[in-house]
Image (cartoon, rainbow, N blue to C red):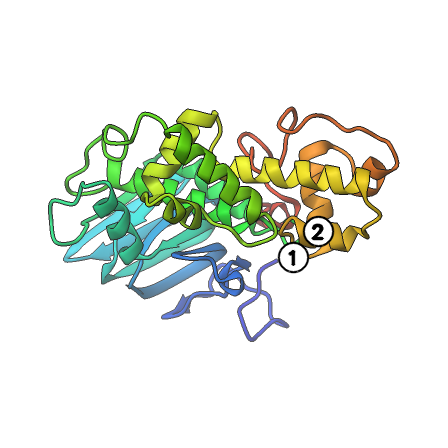
Amino acid sequence: MLTLPGSESRPVTRHDTVRNTLPEPLLSSRWRRWDSVVVELRRARDIDVVIPYRDHVVAVVLAGGANLYQYRNGRGLLRTLYSGDIIVTPAGEPKRWRLTGEALGIVLRLSPAYVDKVAKQAGANQAPETQLQDNFGTRDAHVEQIALRFLKALEPEGSVARIYVESLTFQLAAHLLRHYSVHATPGILVEKRPAALSQPRLRRAIEYIDAHLADDVTISDIAAALTMSPGHFAHAFRQTVGMPPHRYVLHCRIERAKSLLRNSDFPIGQVAQRIGCSSSSSFCFLFHCATGVTPRSYRNGKPGFPFGSAGDLVRAKDTPLPSQSQRFIDIT
């Protein structure tokens, strides 16, 4: 049962309409202060609103079957939304939304400045600023998967390292530039990437990562140490090492945690701090996802499985929605 904000005592009926305002998101990343992206899980019913668009916005429908009318720049479109539909709205003029029925979706807000920066680093911007295209109700499995991974990163008990969110943000921006920009080019951010890291650069990257495992290290930090752009570094690192930077950093953190658990008497909270986790609970969640056992069980001699051999946190593909989000799926 859904209730209007500020009137929780009164159930919403099919005849209620929320005009000029949206319900508060069910989940949001705003308090996490992620760079260049805001992730929200939103649920709406029978709304008629005009929304300003200062950011590029991607919406992914999770459930609903509602009818949605959009009006922007003198053009109106109407369609029925189904699970998996994607809506891309570039920053610019306000857009009117009229929703009849109920829908649940993930909303991703990308900073236009960040998308422009990714385009410039790729040498792909042929205009003074990047121009994305409005897209209403397309299907895009890659965007859907990125959105689900962002949603998984919102889990309160699953405090995800910022480097993973940074990687997802770059993947989304690059995909939008390849497929949804006015000058869309399939080879953008691919054909100009370096073939591999040189051995000196690879050594510097590994040494930097090893020295900063206790910090909130990002791909941008590592790339800056190598005087490379984050996008080119991420591609080259993956081609050289066989895994993306964020996954390698997680691997190193888990291996250091194993070593500390085996060879020291540090409390669990201190082990968490030494590998860059903000709390014991987030460390326990991360360690269990990566190894299949808790830190305490590992310290007591239970081996767990090797890193990456089962469903660890960063391999969210084909996994069910996280528990905190799943409860919102069943629309009544």
Q: Is residue 126 left or right of residue 5?
A: left
Label 1 CA crowd tier, 10 Å (few <14, some 14–19, many 20+)? some
Q: Residue at x 47, y 57 (%)?
A: 34
The residue beneath circle 2 is 272
Q: Is residue 5 left or right of residue 123?
A: right
Asked if one can make out residue 83 in the rendered structure from this viewpoint, the answer is: no
Q: Residue at x 38, y 57 (%)?
A: 36
Name the outermost residue toward the bottom: 6
Q: Is residue 44 left or right of residue 123?
A: right
Percent x, y of residue 28: 52, 59
The quarter of the displayed image where residue 96 is located? bottom left
Q: Secondary structure at mark 2?
A: helix
Percent x, y of residue 229: 31, 44
Q: Which of 26/284 is in front?
A: 284
Q: Which of 59/305 is in front?
A: 305
Q: Which mark is residue 286?
A: none
Q: Amino acid at mark 1?
A: Ser
The quarter of the displayed image where residue 139 is located? top left
Q: Which mark is residue 278?
A: 1
Percent x, y of residue 172: 37, 42
Mark 2 or 1 closer to N-term?
2
Name the outermost residue toward the front: 200
Asked if one can make out residue 25 in the rendered structure from this viewpoint, the answer is: yes
Q: Which of 21/159 is in front?
A: 159
Q: Residue at x 37, y 49 (%)?
A: 224
Q: Label 2 vs label 1: CA separation? A: 7 Å
Q: Amino acid at mark 2?
A: Ala
Q: Secondary structure at mark 1?
A: loop
* Quarter containing the N terminus: bottom right
Decide: marks 2, 1 in contact (CB < 8 A)?
Answer: yes
